[in-house]
Amino acid sequence: MFKRRSSLRGPEGLYGWLFTAPMIIILGLFLFAPILMALYVSFTNWNGNGSPFVAGPNAQFVGTKNYTDLFTRDGLTRTAFMQSISNIFYYVLLVVPIQTVIALLLALLVNSRALKAKGFFRTAFYFPSVTSAVAISTVFLFIFGNSGAVNAFLGWFGINGPQWFNDGRGLLNMLLSAIGLDGSKAGWGQHEVLGQTVWQWLSGPSVAMTVVIILVIWTTSGTFMLMFLAALQDVPPEVDEAAALDGATGLRKLLTVTLPMIKPTLFMVLTLGLIGSWQVFDQIYVMGKGNPNGTTLSPAFLSYQTGFADLRYGVGAAMSFILFLIIIVCTMLQRFLLRDKDVRRSRRRQPAVALADQPAGVTK
């Protein structure tokens, strides 16, 4: 028999709790308690008047009605919520991989021994990340305006630029229509799924949402570049020398040596990018509030608008917790896909190895 030993003996455990108590109290009061309160509000029809914890005409307990209505009840609320999910799906599908690749390439560039003035380039690449998102969004409104710098630049080549923030056409729909697959009139495109037609689900990001995607990629790549740079600088020089001796150079070295060495950082960058993309709010609020025609609407902004503008706090809170569950599921799926294969094999073989190590005649 083995006795379980505590890592903290004597007064050390008490001192540890005393030192961490202030932060635990602060987190409990200002983070965990509001989350639990919002969870309760999501099961009520509170309209913002009075207290949501006192039963009355302003706050009635409705159970899971706010959640089920978002998926089963026809109406503007379900249509807007599903449209926001569709918008953010394409947003995440483009932003997360592109910003990760750009951040990794920038990190490899500024980590190169051949590059001069590394400090200048690191600062230049990181500068957009420390600039106010509201300020940059306002600047982009002028740059991509109908008479902005982008359309003026395109005009030099005889290209008539689109009305970026007034064009709600989906890029994927535009591409499919160009090759003769116009589902807006076809029967297959008119089938309704969760309040939206199949053609609307396949619309892709709108022209207006494309501007938001460009903005976010530009402002976030610098932060993730620093994370990759720190990981690259922790790779032992002996590893690069061994790879060079084995003939691994360029892309082969990146895929077989560098990426496996910085895999924990890659997982962190993808996770932070995934969470931040699903929660995008500032840029949506400044650059149109969901317009045109809801094609830039995000679940985070819709939750805010439903609660604070429409005074339906229960529905708004329900949207927030559905978004939370989506983020958790995506993060767990990503973690499963990025797990080391050797760890999976060792876990599968562990029961068999443990059984083989038992003395003869001993069974569990």
Image (cartoon, rainbow, N blue to C red):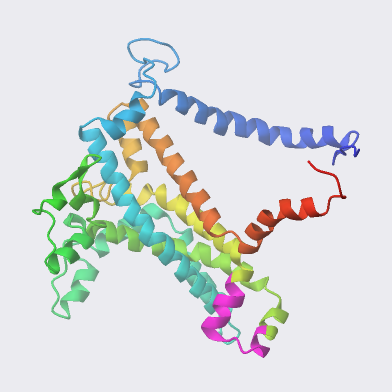
Tally of numbered tags:
0
Q: Looking at this view, is 164 or 104 the one in front?
A: 104
Say if 114 sits above or below 259 in the image.
Answer: below
Give left or right: position of 177 versus 59: left
**Residue 155 image offset from top left, x and y in percent:** 16, 76
Task: Judge whether residue 286 can be spotted in this image.
Answer: no
Toward the front, the furthest residue is: 361
**Residue 184 image offset from top left, x and y in percent:** 11, 54
Give left or right: position of 232 versus 9: left
**Residue 247 image offset from top left, x and y in percent:** 62, 90
Task: Judge whether residue 232 can be spotted in this image.
Answer: yes
Q: Which residue is drawn at 27% across and 32% down?
A: 72
Q: Which residue is drawn at 47% across and 56% down?
A: 273
Dominant SS in magenta: helix
Q: Which residue is drawn at 35% across and 18% down?
A: 49
Q: Looking at this view, is 140 or 313 the one in front?
A: 313
Toward the left, the furthest residue is: 185
**Residue 189 image offset from top left, x and y in percent:** 15, 52
Q: Hey, which quadrant is residue 186 in on the image?
A: bottom left
Q: Hey, which quadrant is residue 149 in on the image?
A: bottom left
Tell me the quarter of the image containing the C terminus: top right
In magenta stretch: residue 130 = no
Q: Looking at this view, is 90 or 128 the one in front?
A: 90
Say if 144 sits above or below 315 in the image.
Answer: below
Give left or right: position of 71 versus 280: left
In magenta stretch: residue 244 = yes
Tell me the quarter of the image containing the N terminus: top right
Q: Looking at this view, is 294 or 133 the one in front?
A: 294
Give left or right: position of 174 versus 256: left
Give, as a single range, the part of the protein colored magenta. 243-259
